[in-house]
């Protein structure tokens, strides 16, 4: 399926062509923190495909990643797409694999020292965590992308707007689900609503 209905470039989501188009849009300020790359490598190790793990490390040009060091977003994409192609059968397809990557990456982040601080500030209140996200995303994303606003839509719901986000939407869906669960939210539901090719509203709700 296309990544965004009505986008200027209509390429099948998950195709090699779509990957290269996404990479072509990345610039110097588009980065991924090492903690997310390490989370992906941990998934690959659990999967047990040593050849795939070796290929991903070769693509990255690194042997290890420092947790909160910036690495090019293009490096993350070049590693993540082949991983999702290979592991998709475990998670209901390519999108499911990316959703699981985001879920596990968020878990890894909130287990880190920086993540624990954000959880402490949230005080186990999902809305407080969401309200803080627009001002804290630069802790884990580059300056060129991020959450621009959080709109509360109810006692247990809201909408987060991401602008110029080059990470596939299912990844963010999984990450948001895991984030809310980290502060005790139950029955978390995340639905993405494309606004433009790489701009998205994420509708979240929980009990």
Image (tube, rainbow, N blue to C red):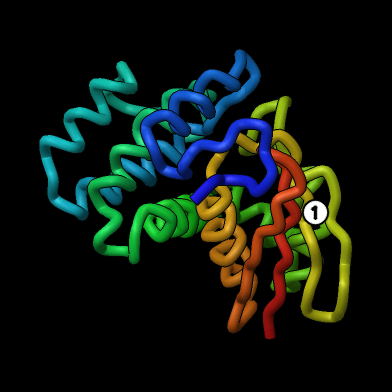
Tell me the quarter of the image containing the C terminus.
Answer: bottom right
Is residue 80 left or right of 168 when viewed as pictured?
left
Q: Residue at x 60, y 31 (%)?
A: 9
Q: Examine the rendered structure and indicate whether residue 175 appears above or below residue 33.
A: below
Residue 91: tell me if it is visible.
yes
Q: Position of residue 117 (x, y in %)?
A: 66, 53
The answer to which of 206 and 85 lies nearer the viewer is: 85
Where does label 1 land, which residue?
132
Q: Residue at x 26, y 27 (%)?
A: 57
Residue sitting farthest toward the bottom: 207
The answer to which of 26 and 44 lies nearer the viewer is: 26
Q: Position of residue 69 (x, y in %)?
A: 51, 26
Which of the 4 image quarters holds residue 7? top right
Is residue 152 left or right of 121 when viewed as pictured?
right
Which of the 4 image quarters holds residue 131? bottom right
Q: Examine the rendered structure and indicate whether residue 73 appears above or below residue 102.
A: above
The answer to which of 113 and 129 lies nearer the viewer is: 129
Residue sitting farthest toward the top: 28
Q: Residue at x 40, y 37 (%)?
A: 37
Check disc 1 and report its element: helix, strand or loop: helix
Q: Residue at x 76, y 47 (%)?
A: 195
Is residue 174 left or right of 183 when viewed as pictured?
left
Q: Position of residue 94 (x, y in %)?
A: 37, 53
């Amino acid at each position: 399926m296309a990544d965004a209905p009505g986008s200027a470039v209509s390429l099948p989501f998950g195709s090699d062509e779509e990957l290269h188009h996404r990479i072509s849009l990345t610039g110097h300020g588009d980065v991924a923190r090492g903690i997310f790359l390490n989370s992906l490598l941990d998934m690959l190790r659990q999967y047990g495909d040593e050849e795939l793990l070796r290929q991903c490390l070769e693509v990255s040009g690194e042997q290890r990643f420092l947790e909160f060091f910036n690495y090019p977003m293009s490096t993350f994409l070049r590693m993540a797409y082949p991983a999702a192609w290979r592991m998709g059968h475990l998670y209901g397809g390519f999108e499911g694999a990316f959703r699981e990557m985001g879920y596990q990456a968020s878990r890894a982040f909130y287990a880190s020292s920086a993540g624990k601080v954000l959880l402490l500030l949230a005080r186990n209140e999902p809305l407080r965590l969401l309200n803080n996200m627009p001002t804290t995303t630069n802790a884990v994303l580059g300056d060129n992308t991020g959450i621009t606003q959080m709109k509360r839509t109810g006692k247990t719901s809201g909408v987060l707007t991401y602008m110029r986000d080059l990470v596939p939407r299912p990844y963010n869906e999984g990450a948001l689900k895991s984030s809310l669960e980290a502060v005790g939210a139950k029955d978390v539901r995340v639905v993405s609503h494309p606004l433009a090719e790489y701009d998205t509203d994420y509708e979240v709700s929980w009990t």
